[in-house]
Image (cartoon, helix red, strand yellow):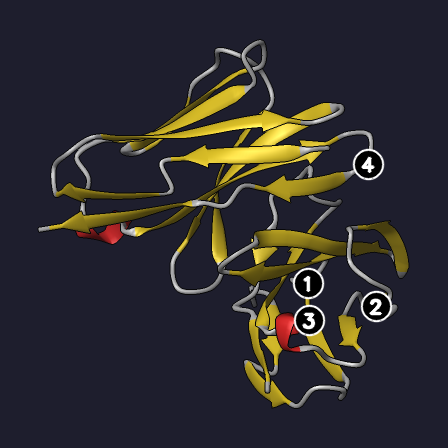
């Protein structure tokens, strides 16, 4: 059965810290891995990863995928209170053309 | 460019009733996907519609159904509501399915009492 596991499930850090969020997956036929940031309600898209070893960056956020070991990490450097959110990892299964979400990592950044 | 619009934002229903939720995607987007989000189960895929056709369906009972209109607006219907259906229902629109960047609406918070 397809599944996506995220760790840790929750995290509290101080402003300025660097955090690493983990996502591992098992899917029948992998197409892509997606990261979303969810504040309050609507998740917002962060990254789409399809190839191993190629880091994607957007400001203080970066992510990389390892298709051999079936995991991805999301790094946030110099965290700010505005980074507080739930970070969702999702994997698209090519066979069934659907997306499976992980439980999310709840990140709290305190001043 | 208007975002994804979901209505209503909040809803309270009693067990046994039915409910219809609406999602208007971003103009030009033809794919609409629906998700249920609960604290215990996280975000779970319900179904996806593309050009008025259901392309895929998650593991939900037949009480959950949907449709898409020619203008790409989509509705989701839940019949014979149960307490466990209380959740945030999110829809996401994209140009060609979830393999492209998807934009989520603010969701409809459904409470079943």
Chain letter belonging to callout 2: B
Q: Secondary structure at mark 4?
A: loop
Quadrant in the picture for the N terminus of chain B? bottom right
Frontmost of labels 1 and 2 is: 2
**Which numbered circle lies on residue A69?**
none
Residue B9, percent across and down? 55, 80
**Residue at label 2?**
B65
Rate crowding at label 2 as few (under 14), some (14 to 19) or many (20 or more) other CA atoms within 10 Å.
Answer: some
Label 3 CA crowd tier, 10 Å (few <14, some 14–19, many 20+) = many
Q: Which mark is residue A96?
A: 4
Q: Chain of mark 3?
A: B
Q: Are marks 3 and 1 on the same chain?
A: yes
Q: Which residue is mark 1?
A: B27
- Which is nearer the N-term, disc 1 or disc 2? 1
The quarter of the picture where residue B50 lies is: bottom right
Q: CA distance from mark 3 to mark 1?
A: 12 Å
Residues at marks 3 and 2 on the same chain: yes
Give how far across and how far down residue B84 sits, in percent. 63, 71
């Amino acid at each position: 059965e397809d599944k996506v596991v995220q760790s840790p499930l929750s995290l509290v850090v101080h402003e300025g810290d660097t955090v690493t969020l983990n996502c591992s997956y098992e899917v029948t036929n992998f197409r892509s891995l997606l990261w979303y940031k969810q504040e309050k309600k609507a998740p917002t898209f962060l990254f789409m990863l399809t190839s191993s070893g190629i880091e994607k960056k957007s400001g203080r956020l970066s992510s990389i995928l390892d298709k051999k070991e079936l995991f991805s990490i999301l790094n946030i450097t110099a965290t700010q209170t505005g980074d507080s959110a739930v970070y969702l990892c999702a994997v698209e299964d090519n066979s069934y053309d659907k997306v499976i979400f992980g439980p999310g990592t709840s990140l709290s950044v305190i001043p | 460019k208007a975002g994804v619009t979901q209505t209503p934002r909040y809803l309270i229903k009693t067990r046994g009733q039915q409910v219809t939720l609406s999602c208007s995607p971003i103009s030009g987007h033809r794919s609409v996907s629906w998700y249920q989000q609960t604290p215990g189960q996280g975000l779970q895929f319900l179904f996806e519609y593309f050009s008025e056709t259901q392309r895929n369906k998650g593991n939900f009972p037949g009480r959950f159904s949907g449709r898409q209109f020619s203008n790409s607006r989509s509705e989701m219907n839940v019949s014979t509501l149960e307490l466990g259906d209380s959740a945030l229902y999110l829809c996401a629109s994209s140009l060609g399915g979830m393999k492209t960047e998807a934009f989520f609406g603010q969701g409809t918070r459904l409470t079943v009492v």
